[in-house]
Image (cartoon, coloured by chain):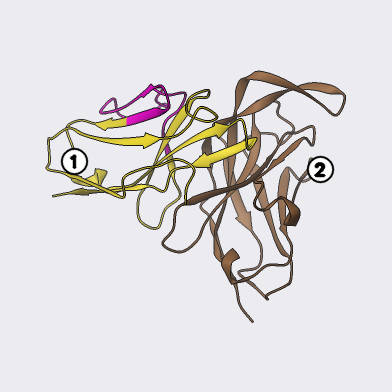
């Protein structure tokens, strides 16, 4: 049974970089069976997809956040990470990491064929609240 | 403003069958699978339905999903008090190359 756990600072100052890590247990980050994703939820609001990464390093980002987001994988630690730069109070949210299913369709990327992500996230971390405040 | 449109609220009495809708467009629901999540207060979302109508292991068959064109629905039969939660729909969007969510429907069990 896959388990995911988010970790990182709970308080970040405006204009600084938010950095979170998701540690995976019960499975390998190098698995070709999933994408690894980040989703956030501002207080009292709905869910917002941030981005996803495949074990190969292929990434998809929310266009509204793309200029500020980087998601990476560390296979040696069985972790994947989120960096969000130039944060403001609007980035205050509970941040979740999750596994994402694979589509039956594939795309040519970075010199290889890779499955597209599907729209569903099946295993979720418990979430971590990040507050942006001075 | 969410890409997928859900009614903000729904309600029902114990034992009743309730449905909630999710409306999208040709680039998301119209061409990709839909999924549904249940979120209880203070907890992470839980996947209820994926690929339009598939239930993950452990999800009761009281929950069912369907899709027609650019809209989808979640039905809950035999409503229970513990079903009171927020429900979100989501899908992959080909135009955005990303996942889009609905704004969520708050279900109240009267």
Residue B74 vs A87, above or below: the answer is: above
Q: Which residue is mark 2?
A: A76
Q: Nearer the viewer, residue B71 or A83?
A: B71
Determine the CA span between mark 2 and mark 1.
45 Å
Q: Nearer the viewer, residue A23 or A121?
A: A121
| Chain A drawn colour | brown
What span is colored magenta in the figure? B47-73
Q: Colour of chain B?
A: yellow
Point 52% across, 24% down: residue: B32
Q: Residues within 10 Å of mark 2 (few under 14, many from 20)?
A: few
Q: Is residue A15 above or below residue B27?
A: below
Residue A40 in the image, given as x and y percentages of width and height: 55, 54
- Does any portion of residue B75 appear in the rendered image? yes
Q: Which mark is residue B80?
A: 1
Q: Is residue B59 visible?
A: no
Residue B98: where, in percent of width, then height?
Answer: 62, 38
Find residue A103 and report its image quarter: top right
Residue positioned most to the front: B26
The chain identifier of the residue carrying mark 1 reads B
Direction bottom: furthest residue = A134
Disc 2 chain ID: A
Q: In which image quadrant can residue A93 be found?
A: bottom right
Q: Residue at x 65, y 39 (%)?
A: A36
Residue A79 in the image: state x and y as whole percent. Answer: 72, 46
């Amino acid at each position: 049974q896959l388990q995911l756990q988010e970790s990182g600072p709970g308080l970040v100052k405006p204009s600084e970089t938010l950095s979170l890590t998701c540690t995976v247990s019960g499975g390998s980050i190098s698995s070709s069976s999933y994408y690894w994703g980040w989703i956030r939820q501002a207080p009292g609001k709905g869910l917002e997809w941030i981005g996803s990464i495949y074990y190969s390093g292929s990434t998809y980002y929310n266009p509204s956040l793309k200029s500020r987001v980087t998601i990476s994988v560390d296979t040696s630690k069985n972790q994947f990470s989120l960096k969000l730069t130039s944060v403001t109070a609007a980035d205050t949210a509970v941040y979740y990491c999750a596994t994402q299913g694979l589509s039956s369709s594939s795309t040519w990327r970075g010199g290889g064929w890779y499955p597209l992500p599907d729209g569903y996230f099946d295993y979720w971390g418990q979430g971590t609240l990040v507050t942006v405040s001075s | 403003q969410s890409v997928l449109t859900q009614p903000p609220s729904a309600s029902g009495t114990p034992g009743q069958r309730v449905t909630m809708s999710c409306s999208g467009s040709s680039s998301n629901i119209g061409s990709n699978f839909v999924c549904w999540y249940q979120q209880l207060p203070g907890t992470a979302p839980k996947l209820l339905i994926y690929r339009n109508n598939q239930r993950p292991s452990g999800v009761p068959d009281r929950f069912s999903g369907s899709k027609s064109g650019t809209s989808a629905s979640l039905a809950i039969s035999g409503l229970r008090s513990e079903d009171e939660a927020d429900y979100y729909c989501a899908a992959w969007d080909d135009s955005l190359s990303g996942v889009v969510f609905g704004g969520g429907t708050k279900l109240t069990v009267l």
